[in-house]
Image (cartoon, rainbow, N blue to C red):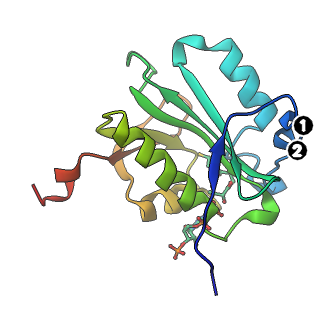
Amino acid sequence: MLEAMQIRLAEITDADRDAVLAVRVRPEQERFVASVEKSFQDARDNPEAQPWFRAVHDGPVPVGFVMLSWGLVPGPGLRGPYFLWRLLIGAEFQGRGYGRAVLDEVVTLLRAAGATELWTSCVPGDGSPEPFYRRYGFLPTGEVDEDGEVVLRLPLARDDRGQG
Ligand SMILES: CC(C)(COP(=O)(O)OP(=O)(O)OC[C@H]1O[C@@H](n2cnc3c(N)ncnc32)[C@H](O)[C@@H]1OP(=O)(O)O)[C@@H](O)C(=O)NCCC(=O)NCCS
């Protein structure tokens, strides 16, 4: 049986940087998500996107990586202020609830920051993470972005589920 999952989103230090870089998805998933290394580079190259990233830990070894735009100013090609930019769970750790647990942690942090919605986008098609996001509660917006990715939005305000 599954035990209660207790993950931690941790800042990346010089000591564990290589272990985080070693987190890899399955080869056939590489068309859906960029690597951790590319994510670090994108974060450096796009400061206006307000990158915020963390390693996902369940014990000492990182099992995943998550990166958001945290508080960007929305504009052409920039959805926000909160946008889930990268989410990867290492191939050997997938299917154990880590992806959902990361979203739970991120949602808790975002709600505490007063966020009312979280945006993301993903490549559609066979093996796409879109069903994972839909299952979590992300709603399709009907938009397709400039890279051909479908745009999804997760409402975070407590009254969004009609309970006022
Ligand atoms: C997508 C990803 C983050 C999901 O993480 P995970 O830890 O394997 O997912 P979980 O175990 O938390 O799964 C949660 C639920 O989503 C379902 N699910 C997960 N991935 C899915 C997929 N690709 N298609 C359909 N359902 C999926 C699970 O079956 C589970 O369903 P349940 O509610 O019935 O138990 C992970 O598979 C991954 O890193 N994929 C490659 C990178 C990627 O595509 N990232 C997203 C970039 S936009």
What amino acid does circle 2 point to?
A: Ala
The amino acid on which the numbered mark 1 sits, given as a three-letter code, is: Asp
**Is residue 77 left or right of 27 when viewed as pictured?**
left
Secondary structure beneath label 2: loop
In this rendering, is residue 30 above or below 97? above
Asked if the residues shown at circle 1 and circle 2 are in contact, with their CB atoms under 8 angstroms apart, the answer is yes
x then y, percent, for residue 80: 39, 27
Residue 143 at least partly seen: no
Left or right placement of residue 117 versus residue 76 in this view: left
The quarter in which the N terminus is drawn is bottom right
Between 22 and 144, the one nearer to me in the picture: 22
At horizontal 36% and vertical 50% (from top left) the residue drawn is: 140
- Quadrant for the C terminus, please: bottom left
Quadrant for ligand 1 reads bottom right
Mark carried by residue 18: 1
Element type at marker 1? Answer: helix
Which mark's residue is nearer the viewer, 1 or 2? 1
Q: Looking at the image, is 4 positioned above or below residue 33? A: below
Measured as percent of width and height from the top left, residue 76 is found at 41, 16
